[in-house]
């Protein structure tokens, strides 16, 4: 896609150019990790292959180049949406707004060195997605759940032509993920007569300024579940939860007790400290960012408590574990720990799959949605 240079939008605050050879080398390594390890995530989320392929051809070596590409592309999709909406083409406008929102999501993705630019892209991501909500088919609406001094934002979508109450699945994003990035997960539930609710919890999206504490996050997810049970369009006894990556652990913690009738985790950690020595530099930086840890020692104090060891036995509902055979970020042994400690656990290892099975999303995601449908019964 050709990116317009004549858009009437305020310029994004581009990150500065690295000033030392050491900074330049560090940035180049970080951008390389994102470009080589997370492209499947971007495409599975909804970034068009052509847009990613053009970025790969440019071979960015700095966050300035990375950020500039994605923000310009996001503005271009916003302009396309404006034109489509003016012509009365609501679904087309919605599609462009979602893609533009994703462009801003990945503009700020792991941009820990440049907080001002990161905040700018976070704001634009939410603004574009909010504009798309009234244009979605089937319906979508935003709700906010008050808990622990926070207002937790949730996007709720019900299946098209749904008669009466339907089951629902709460979708929990992972590290550096948000409710907007979960958009392409939702369709698989909607097609099976299941409502989809994607949330931002503490440390994510609209609540990124709040430090991530797993116990607080789990409490927020359970509060969302209670709100969903009171929704007149949903079946209160059929509320499930799924989490991906870091969200897998967070969803698992929320599933302890009786707030959910089915739960799933995809490539999440069972005991974060046991895999910490294998984590790459950006993963470590991401955890430090969301916990707002001042030092590495402070971060490690947090990480030691990020475990399901004493909690897993409290998950009483059916529990699905899905893990990529070739996951380079969360090792497979984390999945086997879930299998060995959760009472009603079922483990599915996806052959040839990477982290969150993003490289085979067309196989993994419908399988997971089918599993939830089976747990809920005919819908």
Image: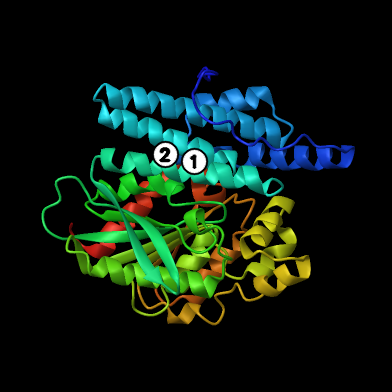
Tell me: residue 197, above or below residue 225: above
Is 34 placed left or right of 223 in the picture? Answer: right
When asked about the image quadrant of residue 331, the answer is bottom right
* The one of 316 and 74 positioned closer to us in this rendering: 74
Give the percent coordinates (x, y) of residue 122. 53, 46
Seen at 72% across and 43% down, the residue is: 30
Tell me: residue 124, above or below residue 331: above
Give the percent coordinates (x, y) of residue 341. 51, 77
Q: From this viewpoint, is residue 47 visible?
A: yes
Seen at 23% across and 61% down, the residue is: 167
In this figure, which residue is indicated by the disc labeled 1?
124
Report the label total.
Answer: 2
Q: Gap in Å between the C-alphas at discs 1 and 2?
A: 6 Å
Q: Secondary structure at mark 2?
A: helix
Q: From this viewpoint, is residue 360 visible?
A: no
Give the percent coordinates (x, y) of residue 58. 67, 23
Say whether marks 1 and 2 touch (CB < 8 Å): yes
Question: Which label number is shown at residue 222?
Answer: none
Q: Secondary structure at mark 1?
A: helix
In this figure, which residue is indicated by the disc labeled 2?
128
Tell me: residue 336, above or below residue 68: below
Seen at 52% across and 75% down, the residue is: 215
């Amino acid at each position: 896609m050709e990116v317009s240079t004549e858009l009437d939008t305020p310029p994004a605050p581009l990150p500065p150019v690295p000033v030392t050879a050491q900074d330049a080398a560090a940035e180049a390594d970080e951008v390389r990790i994102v470009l080589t390890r997370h492209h499947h995530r971007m495409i599975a989320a909804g970034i068009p292959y052509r847009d990613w392929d053009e970025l790969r051809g440019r071979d960015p070596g700095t966050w300035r180049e990375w950020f500039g590409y994605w923000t310009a592309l996001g503005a271009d999709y916003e302009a396309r949406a404006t034109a489509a909406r003016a012509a009365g083409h609501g679904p087309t406008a919605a599609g462009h707004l979602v893609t533009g929102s994703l462009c801003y999501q990945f503009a700020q993705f792991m941009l820990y060195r440049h907080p001002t630019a990161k905040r700018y892209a976070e704001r634009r991501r939410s603004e574009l997605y909010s504009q798309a909500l009234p244009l979605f088919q089937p319906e979508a609406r935003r709700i906010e759940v008050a808990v622990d001094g926070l207002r937790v934002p949730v996007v709720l979508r019900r299946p098209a032509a749904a008669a009466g109450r339907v089951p629902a699945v709460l979708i929990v994003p992972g590290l550096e993920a948000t409710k907007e990035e979960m958009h392409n997960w939702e369709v698989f539930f909607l097609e099976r007569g299941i409502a989809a609710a994607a949330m931002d919890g503490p440390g994510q999206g609209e609540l990124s300024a709040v430090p991530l504490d797993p116990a607080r996050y789990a409490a927020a997810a359970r509060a969302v579940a209670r709100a969903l049970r009171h929704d007149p369009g949903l079946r209160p006894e059929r509320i499930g939860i799924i989490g991906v990556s870091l969200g897998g652990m967070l969803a698992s913690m929320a599933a302890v007790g009786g707030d959910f009738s089915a739960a799933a985790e995809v490539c999440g950690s069972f005991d974060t400290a046991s895999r910490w020595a294998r984590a790459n530099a950006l993963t470590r930086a991401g955890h430090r960012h969301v916990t707002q840890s001042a030092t590495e020692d402070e971060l490690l104090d947090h990480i030691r408590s990020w475990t399901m060891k004493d909690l897993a036995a409290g998950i009483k509902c059916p529990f699905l574990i899905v893990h990529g055979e070739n996951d380079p970020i969360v090792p497979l042994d984390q999945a086997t720990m879930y299998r060995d400690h959760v009472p009603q656990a079922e483990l599915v290892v996806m052959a040839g799959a990477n982290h969150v099975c993003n490289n085979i999303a067309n196989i993994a995601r419908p399988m997971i949605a089918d599993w939830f449908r089976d747990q809920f019964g005919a819908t």
